[in-house]
């Protein structure tokens, strides 16, 4: 349907200098750790902190957008408050975990 213009230059490939990533990149061994090998207290604290940190980030980012773009002060303030509470819970979980494991280390070293 469309014939190329005869004087059109050949377009350069911007990725030609990168090479083949499957062949050229270094291989990194994958760790062989089973979830059952991890201390359940560490695993629980980690996943609880991850979920709460995501809720905190969501609240802290959604709240100001609701206020600025839609003028919804009540919902925006509620989202920021939810984010603040979730962030404080992450901090409290981390500090409690740190205290428990510091006590365990002190008992082992004594």
Image: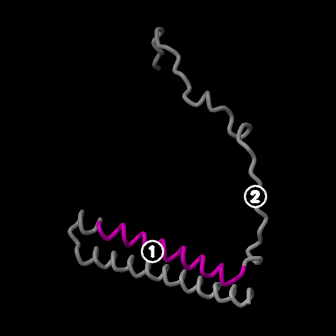
Left or right position of 18 against 84: right
Residue 76, position in %: x, y? 28, 73
Q: Mark 1 touching mark 2, by CB under 8 A?
A: no
Give me the disc on residue 55. 1
Give the total number of marks visible in the rendering.
2
Left or right side of 67 for 16: right
Task: Report the quarter where the C terminus lies.
Answer: bottom right
Residue 36 to residue 71: above or below? below
Judge by depth and name the residue closer to the eye, 31 or 20: 31
Q: In this view of the protein, which residue sits in the foreground, 16 or 99?
A: 99
Secondary structure under the numbered disc 2 in the rendered image: loop
Measuring from the top left, give residue 107's x and y in whole percent: 71, 90
* Depth order, front residue of 22/24: 24
The 10 Å Cα crowd at callout 2, few under 14, some 14 to 19, many 20 or more, is few
Name the residue rendered at 47%, 13% in the picture. 8
| As drawn, 23 above or below 32 | above
In this picture the colour scheme is: one colour
Q: Secondary structure at mark 1?
A: helix
Q: Earlier in the sequence, mark 1 or mark 2?
A: 2
Q: Is residue 53 magenta?
A: yes
Between residue 57 and residue 11, name the one nearer to us: 57
The residue where tag 2 is placed is 30
Residue 57 placement (x, y as % from top left): 42, 69
Residue stretch rendered in magenta on the structure: 39-64
Residue in the image at 65% along x and 89% along y = 103
Q: Which quadrant of the figure has residue 67?
A: bottom left
Which residue is pictured at 75% across the width and 58% down the height?
30
Q: Quadrant of residue 17?
A: top right
Could you tell me how far apart the alpha carbons at marks 1 and 2 are, in whole angstroms?
30 Å
């Amino acid at each position: 349907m469309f014939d190329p213009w005869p004087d059109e230059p050949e377009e350069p490939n911007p990725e030609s200098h990168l090479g083949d990533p499957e062949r050229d990149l270094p291989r990194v061994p994958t760790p062989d750790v089973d979830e059952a090998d991890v201390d359940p207290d560490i695993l629980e604290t980690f996943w609880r902190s991850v979920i709460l940190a995501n809720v905190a980030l969501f609240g802290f980012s959604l709240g100001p957008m609701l206020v600025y773009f839609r003028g919804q002060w009540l919902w925006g303030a509620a989202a920021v408050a939810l984010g603040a509470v979730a962030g404080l819970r992450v901090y409290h979980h981390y500090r409690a975990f740190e205290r428990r494991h510091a006590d365990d280390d002190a008992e082992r070293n004594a």
